[in-house]
Amino acid sequence: MTDSPKSSRALYADSEGNVVVQEFPLREPRDDELLIQVPYSGVNPSDFKTLKFFNCRNRVLGNEFCGKVLDSPTLERLPFWPGEIVAGYVDGDKNRPLSFELDA
């Protein structure tokens, strides 16, 4: 495993529904996960509508992303390599776990 970043910033809806930039600690990726540095993430109208209509709080905004693979405990078994540019989509479920929303 590489020397990965220890924290990450994300656009975050706090407990009162305010949208702020917040720093989060990063955990080591599990065997079936990749750590991806995300310089670009899309925030859509649906993110703000979810906040308003479902009263969602304490969540990172954004679903689509483009980033660079940094690390995984099982990189040798995966079709991705460190430094490779990838794009992805995170499920828009309003209750998704925070560990899968972090943006580097």
Image (tube, rainbow, N blue to C red):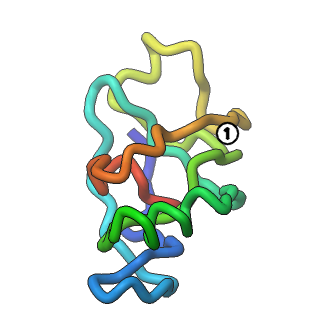
Q: Is residue 8 above or below residue 93?
A: below
Rate crowding at label 1 as few (under 14), some (14 to 19) or many (20 or more) other CA atoms within 10 Å: few
The percent position of residue 41, horizontal first and vertical second, equals 66, 57
* Image coords of residue 35 (percent x, y): 45, 43
Q: Residue at 44% across / 88% down in the picture?
A: 18
Instruction: Identify the image quadrant of residue 8.
Output: bottom left
Give the total number of marks visible in the rendering: 1
The one nearer the camera, 40 or 96, is 96
Query: Residue at left 55%, top 61%?
Result: 47
**Residue under the image location 26 percent in, 34 percent down:** 30
Residue closer to the observer: 67 or 11: 11
Establish if 30 lies above or below 40: above
Q: Quadrant of the N terminus?
A: top left
Q: In the rendered image, which residue does mark 1 sit on?
A: 83
Q: Secondary structure at mark 1?
A: loop
Tell me if I can see residue 24 in this picture. Answer: yes
User: Which amino acid lies under the numbered mark 1 shown in the image of this protein?
Assistant: Gly
Residue 72 vertical position relative to residue 99 in the rendered view, above or below: above
Image-based side of 44 in relation to 98, left or right: right
Place of residue 70 in the rendered image (x, y in percent of width and height, measured from the top left): 54, 44
Q: Position of residue 46 (x, y in %)?
A: 59, 56
Of 60 and 71, the residue lying toward us: 60
Is residue 22 depicted above or below 49 in this figure?
A: below
The residue drawn where x is 70% and y is 46% is: 66
- Residue 104 shows in this picture: no
Judging depth in this view, the residue of 43 and 84 nearest the camera is 43
